Every structure is written in structure tokens, then in C-alpha cells.
Amino acid sequence: MNISSIRIGAIALVIAFGVSCKKEVTKQYAIDEVELYTSASEKKNLKTDEQFISILYSDLFGTAITNTKLQELNQAYTSMGDKVLVIDILIKSMLADPSAEVPTKAAMDAQPANFVKTAYKTLLVRNPTRQEEWFLVNQIEKNKVLEPIDIYYAILTSDEYRYY
Amino acid sequence: MKRREFIRKTGMAAGAMVLPYVLPGGSLFAPTGSRKANHVVFCMFAGGVRNLESVHKNDGNLMPSMLNGNENISSDIVSSMSALPSPAISSPLQNFGTLYKEFRYDQGPTGHFNGHTTAITGQYTNSSLSLLERPSYPTVFELYRKHNTPSMSALNSWWITHTNNLYPILNYSNYEGYGPIYGANQLSPNDFFSGDSAQNLINKNGFPGTNDTLQNDIRKFLNNNFGGGLSTSAGMKNNAEDAAKIENWVDKILLSISNGTINNPWNIPSYMSGDMYNIYFAEEVLKEFQPELLVVNMFGVDACHTNFTGYCNAMRRADWAVGHLWNTIQNTPGLANDTVLIVAPEIGRNGTPNSIIDVNGRAALDHTNSDPMSKEIFCLIAGPPSVVNQGKVISQEAGRSIDIVPTIANILGFDSDIPGLLPGNVLNEAFV
């Protein structure tokens, strides 16, 4: 199965967080399952603008983007010359949308390792390396002000998220 | 003199020689050439305007904010004209500058994209121009950012375009040695800040920005892990400080939109046209950032392909907006009395009408290459009396579209630093 075609098709695998005593639940909103990358180095291709917007939307809202919504967001994207800035604005707007599927702080603080694994699988379509998991868990435990939205924002604005 | 004292004194003298000085507009350092003014706003009175209806007033004075005269609007179309407030300008703009009544777009196809590209690059274009390709010669934005001394960030250079469809890519060229690192901030506010697009962005103000440092640390870690060598920064990009300023401004505008305060802010009876909103947002950029170079276009008059009366009406609205733009410039600290405003259509329209007749029995007009009238335009250059000749009218044929870029370069003092790229001339007749 071709990984990139699955991603471009805006397939969303959303891991829902429950309370700490619950088992991790996997919700699948689309037909195909998402095959995880084994490492970041497999990602060689820059997402096109439309792919980026579509995948961003499905990653955050757990559903494939509609043509109308894609057109609206693409309109905003092409309206500003600084693409790094406009992408940043789009990501912040979506993350701040109350319907964005970002785990709660309580869930993150209760099981930071689970949060990190899920964030990686949902957004970067791979498991974190041991080093990555350690670093992020450490950040969460050390910085009590850190919110899930901060980590999501950092991942979504990372270089890796631009690639598939 | 002791050695140490000698070194101190000569060091101070050398330092004094290279110390920056502050120009009247607040800029540090003088550019290579002397400047006429520290700011230029170029308004493409665009969409295709015929001299017959503009400076020759064949249907009356449809541009009372820009042109002197009380000529009545033709009786057959006057009842179709929308009500507009009195001009926002104390006296018609031509009194603050020099009017070239017989300016020419003298070579190249009379298409909008060709006209825009010529006006922005100072180079003629040919018929094979692709709407999806960036200009093949440097734009005025790149020339400014590359050759002005000291070099300026993109925050000083803006391309405010009415529509998203054709023109966003005019903010930089693919000419070797220029390109995105010298490009302008492009914004299509009518699309970015309006309707559904804005609704998608409005949540942004709820984004908690309190943990910037932590976010940056995590992103840096992720990027280092990813390999670092891969670049996602193709295209024009602001530095971090400027990007933050623009983002804050966007937040302010979005807040105003959600508060409903950007709903006909000029109180125009009936409605504000897209051209008016484009000028409105250009003014907001001018007020916020006081850029040294801003180019803005309009497009409403292109209704003339199917509706001559609508064209006249759009011209009146565009004219009113230009008056408002001048008024805003003169009331903005940093810009007042230190800005040259250039207004010119990118192309004209045909002398021969097409077959579409409007409700008032007037025939519509296209703009085709074979019709010489589509190459006849005007150009108005307004500015401080110490810089621009006031109330001067040049009635004979003089000036071409390709002269606007060298004129802008001359105003900002970097024209002599451009290495033989521009075929046009400085429009010296306009200047004191």
C-alpha cells in the first residue's frame, strides 16, 4: 500500500484520549488504514499546497476536507505572499477552533508518553524514536505551563510535517 | 599626542564620518543617490480605462477627486450613477501634482496581465506571457530591495492586489540574481479578509501565544531530528520580527472584522466596491507600516466589457478611493509631505465598441491589441510641492508605462544603481 497516496487522500487516523485508566481507542474515519512510516527519513516529498491544507484539516478535525472548505482555505493561502506566515496563520486558526481534535491537558499530563506517541502517529504518521519520546515527555513533565496545543503547533509547523 | 589618545581621536573622527544620519522621513542613512521622497505609492487605476472617459471627460467629469472641472455627467447615464460622498480630498489631486494626459502603453498586448507586468517591471512584454509564470524581469520591488542602500526588509515593500486570480505572482520575478529574497509582501485583502476566508481565520485570535519559547524549542528539536537540510522556505519570506508585526496586524484586522467595524468603513451610500476595499486595506498597511514602496491596483472598471455605464460608475468609485488614499497619506505621520503618489491605468480600451448594449443604450468596450486607443492612458504624479510640480498639465504625448519604474527608482534614489536593466526614462517633467 502506498503511504503517500493514503496521506494525500486525507485519511485520518484519530486516537481518542480517554481518562488515564481507559485503554487507547482507535477511531477510523475513512476507508483505508494508515500505514505508519518506519522513520522520518522515508519522507522525501514536499506536500503541495493543497495536500498540505487537506492533510492539516483532516489531521485536526478527523474528517476529510470538503471541496468548499479546501477552496476557502486555498483562497486565504494564495492571498498572502509569505507562505510561511500564511501557513502559520492557518495552523493557529485551525488549532484555536473549538472543534479541533486536540487532546486535553489533563489527558496529556496523565499519560505524557501516550500523548506523544499519539501525536506522532496522528500528525507525523510514525512512532516517535526513543530520543524524541524522552525529549517531549521531559518537556511536558518539566514545563507545567505547556499545553497540548503548544506541542501540536510545534509539530504542525515543523519541517517534517511539510513532507510525506 | 600620546599613542592611545591619537587612536581614540582618529577613531572618533572616522566614526563620525560613517555615522548614520536621519532623513526627514525618519530613515537611517542616505541611499546611494539622493532621494526626492522617502515613500512612493503607485496606484494602478486598473482594469482598462480609456482617456476619452477619464482625462478627456467625454461623458463629463467622472473623476472629480482627481481632475479639475465641473463638467456634467452625460444625461443618458447620470441617473445610473451611484451616490457618493463629497470627495475626501480638499482639492482635486491634479492640483497636487503633474498630469500626463497623453501617456502611452506603447508596446505589447493590451491585456491586463501584460499591462500590470509592464507597469511593475518597467519592461515591455510579449503575447506569450503566461499567467502562471512570474515576470521574466525584476519587479520594482526587487529592484528597490536589491539596489536601495541600505537594503530594506520586505516590510517596506508591498503589493496589494485586488484579486487573487492573476496578480499575486507579480511580487517577484524569476530573473537571475533577483527573485523571492527581494520580493514584496503580497496581499489580496479582498480575498483574505472577506467572507468565508476570513471566517476560517477568525478563530486565530483565540490561539494562546504564551508559550512561544517552548513551542520554538520543540520545533527546533523536531527540525534538527528531521535532518535540517530540507528547505521549506521557497518563496518570499519575512524575517521573524517583521512576520510577527504582520501577524499582529492581521490579528487586529480580524478582530475588527469580528466586531463588525470593517463593514463599509467609509460610509459609502449603497456599498463599498472591491476597488474601494482594496484601497482601504492598502491604507491600513500604509498606516501600520509606513512602507517606502507600495503598489496597489483596482479592477472594477473592467465591467466595461459588458456594461459601459457600470464602467463609468466604477471609475467614479475608483476616483473617490484615490482621493481618500491621498487624504490618508497626508494624515499619516511619516508619510505626510514625504510621499509621491503615482496613478496610472495599466491599459486603455478600444475606440471601437463591441456589440453589447447596456440599459442606457451604451455600447460596451473591450481592449484589443489592434485598437490604438487601448494604448492611450494617463498618468498623474502627486507629491510635496518641494518635489513635484503642482498643477502642471502635459497635454502633448509624453511618457510611457515603462517610465514608471525608473521614476520610482529615481524618487527613492537608487536608479543609478540599477545595472542597465531598464529601457524607460525618469519622468523628469513632473519634478521640481
Image: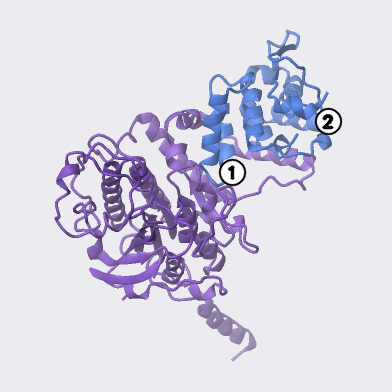
Which mark is in front, 1 or 2?
Answer: 1
Tell me the SS state at disc 2: loop
Amino acid on which the number 1 mark rests in the picture: Lys
Residue B145 lies, in percent from the top left, at 54, 62
Q: Residue at x 61, y 21 (%)?
A: A61
Q: Does the residue at mark 1 contact the one at mark 2 (Cβ under 8 Å)?
A: no
Give neighbour class at mark 1: few <14, some 14-19, many 20+ (Cα, 10 Å): many
Residue highlighted by disc 1: A83
Residue B246 lies, in percent from the top left, at 49, 46
Which color scheme does this rendered protein use?
A: by chain
Subunit of mark 1?
A
Marked residue nearer the N-terminal end (1 or 2): 1
Identify which residue, B44 or B309, lies in the foreground: B309
Occupied quadrant, residue A101:
top right
In the drawing, does residue B336 fall left or right of residue A106?
left
Q: Looking at the image, is A45 positioned above or below residue B113?
A: above
Q: Looking at the image, is B332 positioned above or below residue B405?
A: above
Identify which residue, B25 or A48, lies in the foreground: A48
Residue B75 lies, in percent from the top left, at 14, 45
Identify which residue, A82 or B224, lies in the foreground: A82
Residue A77 lies, in percent from the top left, at 55, 38
Amino acid on which the number 2 mark rests in the picture: Thr
Tell me the SS state at disc 1: helix
The extreme top residue here reads A22
Distance (Cα) linking label 1 and label 2? 30 Å
Q: Which chain is blue?
A: A
| Labelled disc at residue A129 | 2
| Labelled disc at residue B410 | none
Give neighbour class at mark 2: few <14, some 14-19, many 20+ (Cα, 10 Å): some
Q: Residue at x 54, y 56 (%)?
A: B127
Position of the N terminus of chain B, as image quadrant, is: bottom right
